[in-house]
């Protein structure tokens, strides 16, 4: 697994005159979306000191750390293809926090090291009623029932719920449930192309011109690929303003597109 050399960065300040231009590059509202591309860039270049969002400080300004939580939410949704982040993260902790997938290694190096993944999983568990209208949940058979928790997880989630909602160290109160601020990758419009690689059996390249709608474009164009018997298309995904996002496949069990191993996709659905 890669040795991540990471540089923690605060949210950059932008002027009002450049706001629309910058938000076109991030695919969403600046306060929430400024860090959405950073996990993918860190995965692609783990050893060059890639920037990742700085850890929230207790008692600080919550607005400065919306991107910290939103980048985590978007990464779990659009890379792992998870609709049940709480379930996937509990599985990961119960399995001993394995890092044999570089994305888990990155989660561990950033949000895990900050001690905020359990807080996020607890928030997702308690707020499940709010997620059934987000894009990935409407594209599949979303299981919105709360899992029975072990006593250990009950205590852990209860402790995270007791944090004040205005504090930046908790995802509560950050307007993440509705998905509007983090929905850029699944927005209704997209600019992208998908081409089959010549002289290959099941390889394709997907290239999006802008971040907005890139995942929706992958789903719509990728689902139109000719069906294969006992095999899956492997699609290398690129977004011009982000870079290489990973090699994606479509799950036969969930119907969702994901990167990495299928078993790591399954645990979060």
Image: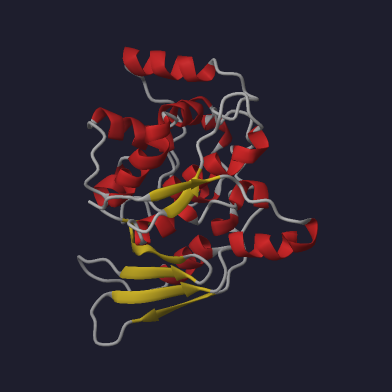
Q: Residue shown at 55%/57% (left/top)?
A: 186
Q: Horizontally, is 209 left or right of 111 in the view?
A: right
Residue at far bottom of view: 199
The quadrant holding residue 226 is bottom left
In this picture, residue 198 sits left or right of residue 49: left
Residue at image coords 71%, 55%: 14
Q: How many labels does the image show?
A: 0
Expressed as whole percent of the image width and height from the top left, the position of residue 266 reads 30, 45
The residue closer to the viewer here, 241 or 197, is 241
Is 6 on the left or on the right of 126, as rendered?
left
Camera-nearest residue between 202 and 119: 119
Q: Quadrant of the C terminus?
A: top left
List x then y, in percent, for residue 73: 49, 43
According to the image, what is the colour scheme of the structure? secondary structure
- Residue 118 in sight here: yes
Query: Front-most of 43 and 198?
Result: 43
Of residue 18 and residue 122, the one placed in the foreground of this image is 18
Q: Which residue is drawn at 33% across and 12% down?
A: 151
Name the residue at 26% across, 34% down. 97
Quadrant for residue 107, please give it. Answer: top left
Asked if residue 268 shows in the view, the reply is no
- Percent x, y for residue 250? 34, 60
Measured from the top left, where is residue 24 in percent x and y? 65, 64
In the figure, 63 relative to 186: above or below? above
């Amino acid at each position: 697994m890669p040795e991540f050399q990471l540089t923690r960065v605060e949210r950059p300040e932008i002027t009002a005159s450049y706001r629309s231009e910058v938000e076109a590059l991030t695919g969403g509202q600046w306060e929430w979306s400024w860090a959405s591309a950073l996990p993918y860039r860190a995965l692609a270049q783990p050893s060059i000191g890639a920037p990742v969002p700085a850890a929230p400080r207790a008692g600080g300004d919550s607005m400065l750390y919306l991107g910290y939580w939103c980048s985590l939410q978007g990464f779990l949704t659009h890379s792992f293809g998870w609709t049940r982040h709480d379930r996937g993260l509990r599985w990961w902790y119960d399995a001993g926090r394995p890092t044999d997938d570089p994305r888990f290694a990155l989660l561990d190096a950033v949000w895990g090291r900050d001690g905020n993944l359990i807080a996020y999983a607890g928030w997702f568990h308690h707020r499940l009623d709010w997620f059934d209208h987000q894009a990935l949940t409407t594209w599949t058979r979303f299981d919105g029932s709360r899992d029975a928790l072990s006593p250990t997880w009950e205590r852990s989630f209860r402790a995270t719920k007791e944090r004040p909602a205005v504090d930046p160290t908790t995802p509560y109160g950050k307007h993440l449930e509705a998905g509007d601020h983090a929905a850029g990758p699944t927005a209704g419009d997209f600019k992208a192309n998908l081409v089959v690689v010549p002289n290959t059996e099941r390889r394709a390249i997907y290239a999006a011109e802008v971040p907005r709608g890139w995942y929706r474009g992958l789903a719509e164009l990728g689902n139109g690929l000719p069906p294969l018997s006992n095999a899956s298309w492997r699609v290398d995904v690129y977004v011009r303003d982000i870079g290489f996002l990973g090699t994606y496949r479509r799950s036969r069990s969930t119907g969702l597109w994901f990167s990495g191993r299928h078993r790591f996709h399954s645990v979060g659905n």
